[in-house]
Amino acid sequence: MSGPPQRSRRTIIFGAATSTLDSRELHLREQPDHETLDLIEMRRQLTALRSKHSDNLLITSLLNRFFVKVAFLVKPTDLTHEQYLKSEFERTLTKVKEIAARSD
């Protein structure tokens, strides 16, 4: 038994009126109210940073730890999870910049 649809992903169903389409329904989904987190882009940036700093074990280790959190995600589970991932990504990028500045 599933619960009600999430607010940002409501489904509108229109029943078919003709006899040839009686068993079919049209499903139209509204777009989310907020911009969805692009996990593919996030993984691409993490991979590029990891390659750029491959000689720095501290940075590579930091990026690998975060990469594991998002490696197999298709999408965040909910808005709270999405906000958490965004803030962790920003925090990780800030730490990488700090470590890189100390190493130079």
Image: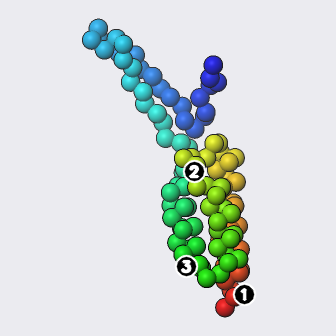
**Residue drawn where x is 64% and y is 66% of the image:** 64
**Residue drawn where x is 69% and y is 69% of the image:** 62
Cα gap from disc 2 to disc 3, whole angstroms? 22 Å
Please give the residue where the numbered disc 3 appears in the rendered image. Answer: 52
| Residue 18 picture quarter | top left
**Residue drawn where x is 57% and y is 38% of the image:** 8
The earlier-in-sequence mark between 1 and 3 is: 3
Query: Picture coordinates of residue 65 (x, y %)?
Result: 68, 63
Judge depth for marks 1 and 3 and give the one in front.
Answer: 3
Cα gap from disc 1 to disc 3, whole angstroms? 16 Å
Q: Is residue 40 visible?
A: yes
Please name the amino acid that badge 1 sits on.
Answer: Arg
Q: In what element is the residue under mark 3?
A: helix
Is residue 37 left or right of 21 when viewed as pictured?
right
Query: Picture coordinates of residue 101 (x, y %)?
Result: 68, 86
Pointer 1 with pointer 2, Cβ within 8 A: no
**Residue drawn where x is 49% and y is 41% of the image:** 31
Q: Quadrant of the N terminus?
A: top right
Cα gap from disc 1 to disc 2, whole angstroms? 32 Å
Residue 72 has which mark? 2
Residue 102 has which mark? 1
Is residue 87 left or right of 39 when viewed as pictured?
right
